[in-house]
Amino acid sequence: MIQTKVLDRLRNSSVLSAAQFDKELLCELTKLAAYLQLHRFPVVHALEDKIMAAAFFEPSTRTRLSFESAMLSVGGKTISVADAKTTGVAKGESMRDIGQMFNSYADIVVVRHTEQRAVADLTEYLRIPLVNGGNGSDEHPTQALADWYALLKWRPEIAYGQIPEKFRLNIGIIGTPGNMRTVKSFLTLALLFPENVNHITIFSEMADPLGAELREMCNGSPIGINFSRDLQGSLEYLDVVYMNAIAYLGDGYRFFGEEFQLSAKSKLKDDTVILHPLARGDELSTDLDETQHNLYFNQADGAVWIRQALLLAIFDRVRNIVPDNLLN
Amino acid sequence: MIQTKVLDRLRNSSVLSAAQFDKELLCELTKLAAYLQLHRFPVVHALEDKIMAAAFFEPSTRTRLSFESAMLSVGGKTISVADAKTTGVAKGESMRDIGQMFNSYADIVVVRHTEQRAVADLTEYLRIPLVNGGNGSDEHPTQALADWYALLKWRPEIAYGQIPEKFRLNIGIIGTPGNMRTVKSFLTLALLFPENVNHITIFSEMADPLGAELREMCNGSPIGINFSRDLQGSLEYLDVVYMNAIAYLGDGYRFFGEEFQLSAKSKLKDDTVILHPLARGDELSTDLDETQHNLYFNQADGAVWIRQALLLAIFDRVRNIVPDNLLN
Amino acid sequence: MIQTKVLDRLRNSSVLSAAQFDKELLCELTKLAAYLQLHRFPVVHALEDKIMAAAFFEPSTRTRLSFESAMLSVGGKTISVADAKTTGVAKGESMRDIGQMFNSYADIVVVRHTEQRAVADLTEYLRIPLVNGGNGSDEHPTQALADWYALLKWRPEIAYGQIPEKFRLNIGIIGTPGNMRTVKSFLTLALLFPENVNHITIFSEMADPLGAELREMCNGSPIGINFSRDLQGSLEYLDVVYMNAIAYLGDGYRFFGEEFQLSAKSKLKDDTVILHPLARGDELSTDLDETQHNLYFNQADGAVWIRQALLLAIFDRVRNIVPDNLLN
């Protein structure tokens, strides 16, 4: 049963940060996504009267196309800015004027921008919901929803009560949560599962990979968090490895060095799964693609459905798609 | 009552210039736009069988997205060129061959181009209607329609008979009509209201801001037109101020100097309204946004609806949306 | 009667090469295209539940917009990458990861790429059909379908039995089939008509315009093939001239020299037709546009319909559009 009362909290709401989600809301949203992914209907008109603006001032094929696909396959319409170079931004236009513009053209706007503060600026004059599709080094909340949708399909029991200690998760995060948006949003959602996440290890070359804001969040969590540079030596303890294409190393982004790369030769436990938001570089060898460690293709597949679930919840159209007997 | 007989003049027609509109046609179109803006239906299929090509050889987010939004929300479909760099034009293709191409792919084409003559060249082999979305320094007729839609919503009495002299409009236009497309198209429509437009003052640093063609049009009008460089000293006489982001100063485009900027400190009359096609620069201070002088957000909001009205009239589908009892 | 059994061979298939088509399949597809072009319905929902990704890593307005238009006008939806610069490819992402991505977002993907091997790489992880929209110097199969759709509308008898010798076609191809994708794909389909194609002359400045692969194909054909540099002196023998905008001359692409240009002054036979995939340069003078030699506009007009026919056949929805009494 999907708890519509919980999903109603998303009605007409903007999604700026992973911190807006509690465990209950995240779980109901993944249940809705699972329903959508299983019951892909031939023709659905649930969002037929809605227009989504995809405003990608920083280009991103995956995020843009997955939102567009999610919208179109339930009958919605899309208008798109694929590249900042084709916008007035090039002329120095302010983000809040751009927000004002979207009020007139769309019913919802998904924004990706190189600058962290762009999203907040954009909302200043905005009267329609906004979904943050990645803002600078800050947040990428819908990526984190896709990450956890994959994990909760892999191990649904994580969402329910406390599982025996030996089954609780040890999660390794390769990257710098304080300066990398996907890592930050993933970690934020990980903190929602203190009963079943045993330990989180952050692998980074930086002295302080969390930064002040996240350190405070982590300090308030019962989950044990430590830092390490020895990924290869830690693999035997990890159930989940979260990777990224690039690392933040204090003075900018670089590709990961060999010690932070994974391949079929890495000493992963038999049942360890790897998450990666893709696109990937050398850090994730393609020889892992055909192994049981590959959860990243599943994660990518699910991204469309969790975004579609989000759009349906924001527009309050869950009831137009899911049969009454599955709703509560 | 909307006069469909008047709107029928737009049936299957191209819109190249503001000069194609007389007062009657402009007013009926704004009445249709007002109906559409008020009665935004959940789902409308009026243009379901039509494809609009948005051919923006010069990028413009606002104009492109507003046309796409207008088309999509009445069921139409869109194909788009957001940027000349993604077209054969980069290879030196002629505009008339490009026009020939659109015959096969679309039912209407909206064109923006940096070159004035591109639009005329494009029509040479074209068998479908074309809407000029801005061609070089020449015209931007649908922007002018949006401008006057905002003015006629603000003061509907302008459209009907002659109002008492003290209520007639004094309009200030900041810019160079002879070389700036939005200004030229706005002025062209202003000349349709000689009964109720008392005076037009053009603020420009150029010796001859009109140029030969517009000077002749203005000379044939009973509306008094004069030129000034003293915007600040003239504000107390103006009911409407039309601004733009950049000025044409004889040898190219530049941002306006301080003497042509407006802010909440400017000595505007209490009931003066400001129009601006946006995006804006420093010439229009954001401290005016929350004041009664701000008609430019209203103007931006209405742009989608006047364009939708235009598309419906061109495709002769007004009757598919507006109830019979409102049509004449 | 359209032979659905033949078209069923395209069901759920990728189209990588013109060599996948035999005469029977090509002819049934052109018959379907002709039906679609003649009976353009007001509203068709045949592909309403399908999303096409147009992945143009090399920009191409004509090919992209014609596929989008074909998809939209039968109710399908589109998501598009108009330019490689807006994709992860810029970051060095592998084509097979990109293919994996499209599995999740679309039901079919049309790809254009500068690199020949990109299309094959993309299919490695792909579970949805792919249509090659032009890959480097290799193939452009749907352009060749459009070429032959135009020729078969012009002379339908080519498709049926053997016509008297004096009516059989002498075809001139200006270009280098071994290194130009449109020319290669056109020639590949020409070899399907040995009964009614008498002779093919290839006009190129290169010593070996065919290359090994095509030479073998041509050697196996009963059609006489020869090479010449004297286009102007050969025109009196040619029934069809196939041109292109640029020539491959061994060390790269260049515009054609004067000896390979055609104009109204060229000594064409009265009933000779010219094909050109457009966009054109100086090689094809616009003074031919209004003459009976112009089959290239017809060829361009038909491209949407042959592509729509292909999409309907791949999705097995021919029966949703064509009445039963026209199907066999």
Image (tube, coloured by chain):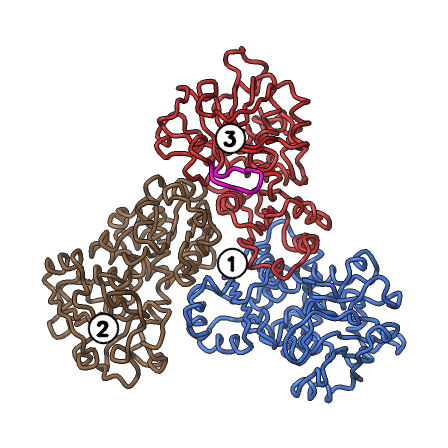
Chain colours: A brown, B red, C blue
- Where is residue C161 shown, x and y percent of the image? 81, 77
- Where is residue B126 shown, x and y percent of the image? 70, 49
Chain ID of residue with mark 1:
C
Q: Which residues are magenta?
A: B245-256
Q: Secondary structure at mark 2?
A: strand
Task: State the image quarter where residue A103 is shown.
Answer: top left
Q: Which residue is mark 3?
A: B174
Q: Is residue A197 above or below residue C291?
A: below
Query: The N terminus of chain C appears in which quarter of the rendering?
Result: bottom right
Q: Secondary structure at mark 3?
A: strand
Alpha carbon separation for disc pair 1 and 2:
36 Å
- To the question of a shared chain for discs 3 and 1, the answer is no
Is C286 on the left-hand or right-hand side of B196? right
Image disc number at residue B276 = none
- To the question of a shared chain for discs 1 and 2, the answer is no
| Nearer the observer, C67 or A185 | A185
Residue at (31, 76) in percent of width and height: A283
Mark 3 crowd level (few <14, some 14–19, many ≥20, 10 Å Cα): many
Q: Amino acid at mark 1?
A: Thr
Image disc number at residue A240 = 2
| Nearer the observer, B237 or A22 | B237
Q: Is residue B69 above or below residue A132?
A: above
Report if the CB atoms under discs 2 and 3 are less than 8 Å apart. no
- Where is residue A279 shown, x and y percent of the image? 37, 69
**Can residue B94 be seen here?**
yes
Q: Is residue B248 magenta?
A: yes
**Can residue B41 be seen here?**
no
Q: Which residue is mark 1?
A: C78
Q: Is residue C253 magenta?
A: no
Alpha carbon separation for disc pair 2 and 3:
62 Å
- To the question of a shared chain for discs 2 and 3, the answer is no
